[in-house]
Image (tube, rainbow, N blue to C red):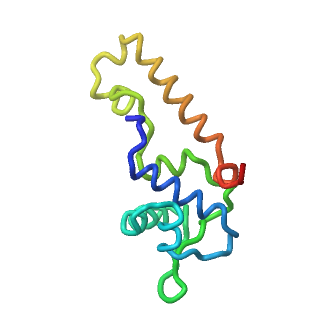
Amino acid sequence: MMELTRKGEYAIRGIVYLAGKPLDKVCLLSDIAAAVDVPPTFLAKIFQQFSKIGLVKSFRGTGGGFMLGRAPENITLLEVVEAVEGPIVPNRCVAIPANCDRSGACNVHPVWRRVQGEVRGVLNGVTLKELSEEG
C-alpha cells in the first residue's frame, strides 16, 4: 500500500532531524524524540532498524545516541521510506505478480508498474540534505 504509516512518518521526522545536525554530532534519542514529537520507545525501534542497514550509527553508554550513517546528500527519501515500510507497491499485483493470474493479460498492470516507478523516482530524487535545509 502506498499510504505512509505512522511508523513511516515518525521515521522521516527523526532522520530528517538528524540530517540537520553536524555529521559528527551524536544526538540523544530523548532529544530527537522531543524535538520531532515522537514517542522515544517507538523512535528507538525505528532507529535500531536504521542502524542495521547503515542509515544511522548508534552509540551505547554514556554520551550514547545516534548520528547519521552517511552524508545527508547520500541518503534518499526512498531509502528511508522503504527501510520502514517495505517496497512501494500501488497494487497487490505489482507486489507479487505470481499471485495474480491476470498479470499477463491485464491492461492495467503496466499502469500500476508505471505508478510504482514514478513514485519511487520522485522519492529517490529527494535527499535528506534537501529536507533538512531551512526554508
Does 120 appear above or below 52? above
Q: Position of residue 127 (x, y in %)?
A: 65, 49
Question: Residue extending furthest bottom?
Answer: 62
Q: In the visual, does 5 lie left or right of 81?
A: left
Q: Residue at x 68, y 74 (%)?
A: 24
Which of the 4 image quadrants contains residue 93?
top left
Q: Is residue 102 above or below residue 39?
A: above
Estimate the x, y position of residue 14 in percent, counting from the top left: 52, 60
Identify whether 129 is placed above or below 39: above
> Picture quarter containing residue 90?
top left
Q: What residue do we see at 53% from left, 65% from top?
A: 35
44 to the left or right of 117: left
Camera-nearest residue between 66 and 101: 66
Q: Residue at x 41, y 14 (%)?
A: 108
Percent coordinates x, y for residue 21 in the rendering: 66, 67
Q: Quadrant of the N terminus?
A: top left
Left or right: where does residue 56 sit relative to residue 103? right
Q: How far across and down, in percent of the image, does residue 18 sit?
A: 60, 64
Q: How many circles with numbers are drawn on the protein?
A: 0
